[in-house]
Amino acid sequence: MPWKNGLGETIEIARSPDGEALDGFDWRVSVAPVGADGAFSVFPGIDRTIAVIEGAGMTLDVAGRSVALRPGVPFTYDGGLAVHGRLVDGPVRDINVMVRRGRCTCEMVLVSGTGSIAAVAATVVAYALDGEWDVAADDDGRRMGPGSSVTTDAAPLTFLPATPRARLALAVIRPI
């Protein structure tokens, strides 16, 4: 789907309520390639958390200050601000979690697999970055490969890396 400002494309992983327009969601998780410096879309009333998941990084100019986005380190900012991104050394791919201020909060964690991870929250969106992950919920299980996702509401999940160097992005979204 096109970016709100029309300057790029994004792949939506999950949104709530499902099917709601870009100005009506409570939360949204997406992945996007960024191939050039440029303005970010403005989302008034939205808190955005972004992390570079591929590439050397990006610098964001946010409200008069420069913030270096290092790979794998999430950064949260007011989505209503004018933000300009500058690539450090070539294209990147990022993951974005957007939550409507006053309705939800979000915590994003990027993990590399060596042990199991238990996730219990109101909503968890997991996106496999690299390798494969075994996901277990009660008596049900499945395997996630790169680019696949799992979304759950209130059901506890356990993530276990099934391959070396497996990486996973977890967005924990809680209602206010």
Image: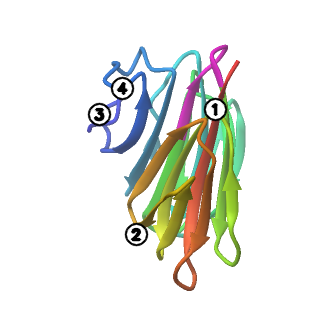
Sequence order check: which comes first, mark 3 or mark 1?
3
Sequence order check: which comes first, mark 2 or mark 4?
4
Q: Which residue position is annotated with label 1?
A: 122
Q: Magenta segment: does it hold 98?
A: yes
Q: Which region shows up in magenta?
A: 97-104
- Decide which of 154, 60 is in the foreground and name it: 154
Sequence order check: which comes first, mark 4 or mark 1?
4
Q: Residues within 10 Å of mark 3 (few under 14, many from 20)?
A: few
Do callouts 3 and 4 mark residues in contact (Cβ within 8 Å)?
A: no
Amino acid type, mark 3? Gly
Q: Which residue position is annotated with label 4?
A: 18
Amino acid type, mark 1? Ala
- Residue in the picture at 68% in, 69% down: 116
- Residue in the picture at 57% in, 27% down: 99
Q: Which residue position is annotated with label 2?
A: 145
- Colour theme: rainbow
Quote the CA–CA distance across marks 3 and 2: 30 Å
Q: Position of residue 59 (x, y in %)?
A: 61, 52
Amino acid type, mark 2? Gly
Does 69 sit above or below residue 155? below
Instruction: Look at discs 4 and 1 and give the one toward the viewer.
Output: 1
| Residue 105: mark | none
Does 169 sit above or below residue 50? below
Q: Can residue 37 be spotted in the picture?
A: no
Do callouts 3 and 2 mark residues in contact (Cβ within 8 Å)?
A: no
- Residue in the picture at 48% in, 63% down: 128
User: Element type at marker 3?
Assistant: loop
User: Element type at marker 2?
Assistant: loop
Q: Which residue position is annotated with label 3?
A: 6
- Asked where in the image residue 80 lies, by quadrant, the reply is top right
Sequence order check: which comes first, mark 3 or mark 4?
3
Q: Position of residue 53 (x, y in %)?
A: 53, 62
